[in-house]
Structures are given as structure tokens and as C-alpha cells.
Image: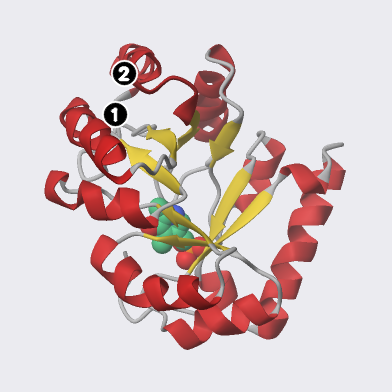
């Protein structure tokens, strides 16, 4: 793990430099889903403070005690959120990367009001138009982004996507980046263990890397 984190950090730097970007403009989100708190602690010991989890329940169990000890942890929710879990997501997340449908917006607004917390929001786009994946369809994304901006203003900070597997991700990354540019959203979350370097070349400001840091998960998602 130890060594992996160092290698990924170096690869991010090199990928940034290859396309004349400042490595500081790319944040590594270490995706710790299915890995225990001890793995997160090992990453914290190496000054990695930004993590991604895709299930709210798991995120709460793992991170509430960790955040008590290490308040500068930054947690990103990167999985689909059921409406009844949105309050828990708002309570724990610094960034919700998966705002993906209109039905989530009122519960999200209520949860923000009720908790007084205001996580940054990213719009998830189903960039490959895959039926099994979450995210707003590209054809509906402009309207949805505009609606989110109207309701949440500057809390809306970026876009996020997971391109189809086993295809060249570059055209999908470019398409996602174009949505961010159209609305001048500063953050573009794309790129995982297999393709984060390509994502950086296409403008990613956050890469979400799990297995290349923590090893394989027990179950593939
Ligand atoms: C699991 C997951 C990742 C990390 O995937 P790896 O291939 O293990 O790097 C990134 N983003 C999302 C949304 C995920 O669910």
C-alpha cells in the first residue's frame, strides 16, 4: 500500500507534466471502499487525506471514528445515493460527486438546510449512455446542470463520470470535460486505476484511484 500510494502520486505528477499541467491542480481521491479502516489509517500516515467511498453505510461506519481523530480528512461520496440516505451523505461528505437525478434535489436541499452543512456538489453524467450506470444522460445534462446551478448556486463545483469499460476512454473524458467548460465548473472528476493518466491529459482535476493503491477489492464493482 505504502509503496503504491507513492507510485500513484508520482504517476499523477508525471502525467500532469507531460501535458504542461501543474501537478498541484490534480487531486488524488483514494477510493477505500471495501477496505478496512486500518488501510485508510495507513494512507493517512502517508499524508493522504482525501478519500472516496461509494456506500453511505460503509462510509459512516468507517469514517466517523476516523474523522474524530483526524478532522482534516476529506470524504467524497462517489456512489449512487438513495433518497433516504441523502441526509447521512450530507452529514459525512465534503463532496457529493453523484448528483445524478432531479428526484434527489429536494431531499438534498432539505438535508443541507437541516444539517447546516454544505458539501460541494458534482453532477454525475452517464457519459457512455449505459443502462446499468447511474448519471444523468448527456442529452439531459445541460438542463440538469442549469437546474442544479439555479437551486444550489456555487455549491455546484464540477462533473463526474465513469466511462465504459474496455473502450478507449479518451473521447468520453473529452466529452465530460466539455460539460465542465460550458458551465465554467472548476472540477472534473474522472480517471480510475486503469486510466487516470489519460484522464489527466483530458483535464481531470480529481482522479479516483482505488485498487492501484489499496489492492484488489473482495468484490468487483
Ligand atoms: C470503485 C470506484 C473507483 C476506483 O476504481 P479502481 O479501478 O479501483 O481505481 C473510482 N470511481 C468510482 C465511482 C468507483 O466506484
Determine the residue positioned at 61% across, 28% down: 186
Q: Is residue 123 left or right of residue 16?
A: left
- Compare residues 49 and 124 and report the one nearer the observer: 49
* Contact? badges 1 and 2 (CB < 8 Å): yes
Q: CA distance from mark 1 to mark 2?
A: 8 Å
| Label of residue 40 in the image | none
Name the secondary structure under disc 1. loop
| Label of residue 144 in the image | 2
Q: Is residue 172 left or right of residue 200?
A: left
Name which quarter of the figure residue 99 lies in: top left
Determine the residue positioned at 31% across, 38% down: 112
Percent position of residue 219, x then y = 30, 76
In the displayed structure, 69 sits above or below 193; it is below
In the displayed structure, 13 sits above or below 147; it is below
- Compare residues 191 and 98 and report the one nearer the observer: 98
- Specify the color scheme: secondary structure
Dot 1 or dot 2, earlier in sequence? 1
Question: Which residue, given by chain and number where applicable, does mark 1 sit on?
Answer: 136
Quadrant hosting ligand 1: bottom left
Percent position of residue 183, x then y = 53, 14
Q: Residue furthest bottom?
A: 38
Percent position of residue 39, x then y = 51, 83
Determine the residue positioned at 25% across, 41% down: 114
Percent position of residue 5, x then y = 68, 73
Amino acid at each position: 500500500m505504502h509503496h503504491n500510494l507513492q507510485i500513484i502520486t508520482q504517476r499523477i505528477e508525471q502525467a500532469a507534466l507531460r501535458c504542461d499541467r501543474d501537478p498541484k491542480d490534480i487531486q488524488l481521491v483514494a477510493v477505500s471502499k471495501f477496505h478496512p479502516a486500518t488501510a485508510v489509517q495507513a494512507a493517512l500516515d502517508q499524508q493522504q487525506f482525501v478519500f472516496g467511498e461509494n456506500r453511505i453505510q460503509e462510509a459512516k461506519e468507517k469514517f466517523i471514528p476516523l474523522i474524530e481523530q483526524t478532522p482534516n480528512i476529506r470524504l467524497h461520496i462517489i456512489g449512487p445515493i438513495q433518497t433516504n440516505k441523502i441526509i447521512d451523505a450530507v452529514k459525512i461528505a465534503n463532496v457529493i460527486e453523484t448528483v445524478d437525478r432531479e428526484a434527489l434535489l429536494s431531499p438534498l436541499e432539505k438535508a443541507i438546510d437541516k444539517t447546516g452543512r454544505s458539501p460541494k456538489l458534482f453532477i454525475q453524467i452517464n457519459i457512455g449512455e449505459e443502462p446499468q450506470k447511474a448519471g444523468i444522460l448527456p442529452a439531459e445534462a445541460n438542463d440538469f446542470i442549469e437546474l442544479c446551478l439555479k437551486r444550489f448556486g456555487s455549491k455546484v463545483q464540477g462533473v463526474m463520470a465513469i466511462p465504459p469499460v474496455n473502450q478507449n476512454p479518451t473521447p468520453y473524458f473529452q466529452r465530460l470535460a466539455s460539460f465542465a467548460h460550458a458551465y465554467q465548473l472548476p472540477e472534473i472528476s474522472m480517471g480510475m486505476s486503469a486510466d487516470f493518466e489519460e484522464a489527466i491529459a483530458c483535464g481531470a482535476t480529481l482522479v479516483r484511484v482505488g485498487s492501484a493503491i489499496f489492492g484488489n477489492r473482495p468484490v468487483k464493482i
